[in-house]
């Protein structure tokens, strides 16, 4: 068999050329997207004179222990006029009595009880819709039963971010720092997700928010017909709602440290896998432009590492080219991410960036590949 020598000689150039293309795409996201958040000057809204009455909404399904631990931090916020609505979504533990105890001490706590309904059982969107309908105020602030505001100024930071024309305020919700590699990965993934959606919000191309720390107007909820467009899937009460209702001009962000809301992370790989699988199922209903935008970033990062390994393995004599390409991307990440990680309270993860970045893209890509079309069974 005759082999064209010119083709053989050109193969390494071809492979490294493909690697270079993936590098350029990645540098676009790092230098022209994420740099928006890196250069953003964090604002505090605590002194705002535009503090409208707010309704805080929490959906609770068997959250007895979490409510005992975290609800107080929401109830004692330093805010002139607010109510806290907890929707007890057919809990079978002591949630009802825990809420009644809090109610006796804090009259601004309101409880909405949901009885069992076969078709709507465990539907967070149904529970949240009932809570929104019961809300007395137009500014809605969402969080979860296992969430703890960083300070008693949380509501001022979120509500103060509403200015003329704004209908959505995106907050940030990190996870508590604990020991172990899984905790580092979860915090890294959460910070990476926040870095992405906050950067795109600053670019006026908002595509999602996180329900642990999210606010929008009640009028917007009903104008957009609530969750009707995606009521058939369990997740998406936060990211899909924002994806379908955000415009170039109606979104603001609030990421001052006092605006952060912390949450307990998953503690087993199995529970974390299920959580990411549920999130992957909602992304198929994002606007097509956002699916392409996010898919390109994710896939090219994954293929960057794959092609890098292929190039070095097949042509070890050219190892220095691959290593140079890797470090060019890595140094750009360090420069841009250092400021972002400080804003997002995960500066300790910068030392783990190389390991976590590789693991993250392989884990998330494979998880999404297996679960994008998988039917969701629960919102928990």
Image (cartoon, grey):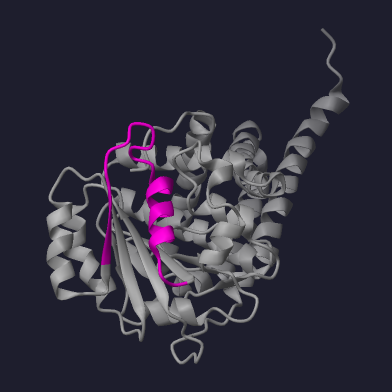
Q: Quadrant of the N terminus?
A: top right
Query: Which residue: 17% across, 53% down?
Result: 95
Name the residue: 55% across, 42% down.
Answer: 230
Query: In the rendered image of this protein, does residue 153 appear above or below residue 222?
Result: below
Determine the image quadrant of residue 141: bottom left
**In magenta stretch: residue 119:** yes
Which residue, as the protein is rendered here, is positioned at the far top? Answer: 1
Task: Provide the residue span drawn in magenta.
Answer: 110-137
Above or below, comparing residue 185 to residue 370 in the picture: below
Q: Which residue: 77% across, 42% down?
A: 17
Number of numbered markers: 0
On screen, residue 365 versus residue 23, left or right, reads left
The image position of residue 56, as x and y in percent, is: 37, 68
Q: Quadrant of residue 312?
A: top right
Residue 328 appears in the picture as rendered:
yes
- Nearer to me, 91 or 41: 91
Near-viewer residue (379 or 313) = 379
- Establish if 277 lies above or below 66: above
Position of residue 130 measured from the top left corner of the image (x, y, whole percent): 39, 53
Residue 9 position in % (x across, y down): 81, 31
**Residue 273 falls inside the magenta stretch:** no
Question: Foreground residue, 323 or 243?
Answer: 243
* Residue at the spot 79% in from the left edge and 36% down from the top edge: 14
């Amino acid at each position: 068999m005759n082999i064209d020598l010119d083709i053989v000689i050109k193969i390494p150039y071809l492979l490294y050329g493909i690697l270079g293309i993936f590098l350029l795409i990645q540098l676009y996201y790092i230098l022209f997207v994420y740099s928006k958040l890196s250069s953003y000057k964090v604002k505090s809204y605590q002194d705002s004179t535009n503090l409208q009455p707010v309704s805080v909404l929490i959906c609770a399904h068997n959250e007895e222990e979490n409510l005992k631990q975290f609800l107080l931090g929401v109830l004692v916020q330093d805010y002139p006029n607010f109510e806290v609505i907890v929707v007890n979504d057919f809990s079978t533990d002591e949630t009802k009595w825990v809420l009644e105890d809090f109610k006796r001490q804090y009259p601004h706590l309101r409880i909405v009880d949901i009885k069992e309904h076969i078709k709507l059982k465990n539907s967070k969107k149904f529970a949240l819709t009932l809570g929104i309908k019961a809300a007395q105020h137009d500014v809605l602030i969402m969080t979860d039963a296992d969430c703890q505001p960083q300070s008693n100024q949380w509501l001022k930071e979120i509500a103060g971010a509403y200015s003329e024309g704004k209908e959505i305020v995106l907050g940030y919700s990190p996870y508590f720092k604990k020991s172990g590699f899984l905790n580092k990965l979860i915090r890294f993934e959460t910070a990476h997700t926040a870095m992405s959606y906050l950067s795109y919000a600053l670019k006026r191309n908002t595509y999602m928010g996180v329900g642990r720390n999210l606010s929008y107007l009640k009028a917007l909820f009903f104008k957009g017909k609530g969750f009707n467009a995606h009521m058939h899937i369990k997740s998406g009460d936060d990211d899909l709602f924002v994806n379908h209702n955000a415009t170039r001009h109606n979104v603001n962000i609030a990421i001052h440290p006092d605006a952060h809301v912390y949450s307990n992370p998953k503690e087993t790989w199995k529970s974390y896998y299920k959580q990411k699988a549920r999130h992957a199922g909602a992304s198929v209903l994002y606007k097509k432009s956002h699916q392409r935008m996010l898919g390109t970033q994710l896939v090219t990062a994954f293929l960057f590492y794959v092609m890098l390994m292929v190039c070095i393995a097949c042509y070890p004599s050219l190892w220095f080219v691959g290593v140079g390409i890797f470090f060019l991307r890595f140094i750009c990440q360090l420069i841009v991410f250092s400021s972002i990680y400080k804003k997002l309270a995960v500066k300790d993860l910068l030392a783990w960036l190389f390991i976590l970045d590789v693991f993250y893209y392989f884990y998330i890509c494979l998880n999404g590949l297996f679960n994008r079309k998988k039917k969701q069974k629960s919102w928990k």
